[in-house]
Amino acid sequence: MGSRYTEEDLSGLRRTSVEGRESKVHTRDFAAPAGPGASVRDLVASFPRLLAGNDFRAAVDALVEAASRRTARERFTIRRLRCSGTRASMWSAESGAACSG
């Protein structure tokens, strides 16, 4: 039984280098290794500056900005919610905070 797809003639195709052609995508926008001992900020900065890389960076920036605007009451409420869940021991170990019920 043969394939249901027809074979295309690819003889007219030619390859070109990414560096050698005009494009909206540039090699400077590609991902770069963060390196050993890199911080989370360095890791996020190493993501590609294309498509989901930009979206992820924008989401991280929005979360950081929202967290910086929280009031003391909001921080306390979030802490209480985290401490009441099953992730309390993990959260308290990461932040150094003690959860009490």
Image: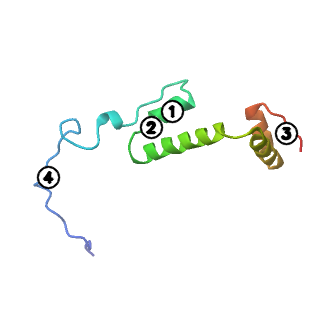
Q: Which mark is residue 43?
A: 1
Q: Which mark is residue 99?
A: 3
Q: How far apart are the two marked residues, 1 and 3, measured between alpha carbons?
A: 30 Å
Query: Which structural element holds mark 1?
Result: helix
* Labels 4 & 3 near each other (Cβ < 8 A): no
Instruction: Give the residue at the far left of this rendering.
Output: 12
Q: How far apart are the two marked residues, 4 and 2, measured between alpha carbons?
A: 31 Å
Q: Earlier in the sequence, mark 1 or mark 3?
A: 1
Q: How far apart are the two marked residues, 2 and 3, measured between alpha carbons?
A: 35 Å
Which mark is nearer the camera, 4 or 3? 3
Query: Which structural element holds mark 3?
Result: loop
Q: Residue at x 26, y 74 (%)?
A: 4
Q: Earlier in the sequence, mark 2 or mark 3?
A: 2
Q: Quadrant of the C terminus?
A: top right
Q: Earlier in the sequence, mark 4 or mark 3?
A: 4
Q: Residue at x 30, y 35 (%)?
A: 27
Residue 100 in picture, x, y percent from top left: 89, 40
* Labels 2 & 3 near each other (Cβ < 8 A): no
Q: Which mark is residue 47?
A: 2
Q: Residue at x 11, y 55 (%)?
A: 11
* Labels 2 & 1 near each other (Cβ < 8 A): yes
Q: For the residue carrying disc 1, how many other residues have a C-alpha within 10 Å: few (<14), some (14-19), or many (20+)?
A: some
Q: Quadrant of residue 29?
A: top left
* Disc 4 residue type (three-letter): Leu
* Disc 2 residue type (three-letter): Phe
Q: Residue at x 49, y 43 (%)?
A: 58
Indicate how the structure is coloured in the image.
Answer: rainbow
* Disc 3 residue type (three-letter): Cys
Q: Earlier in the sequence, mark 4 or mark 2?
A: 4
Q: How far apart are the two marked residues, 4 and 3, measured between alpha carbons?
A: 64 Å
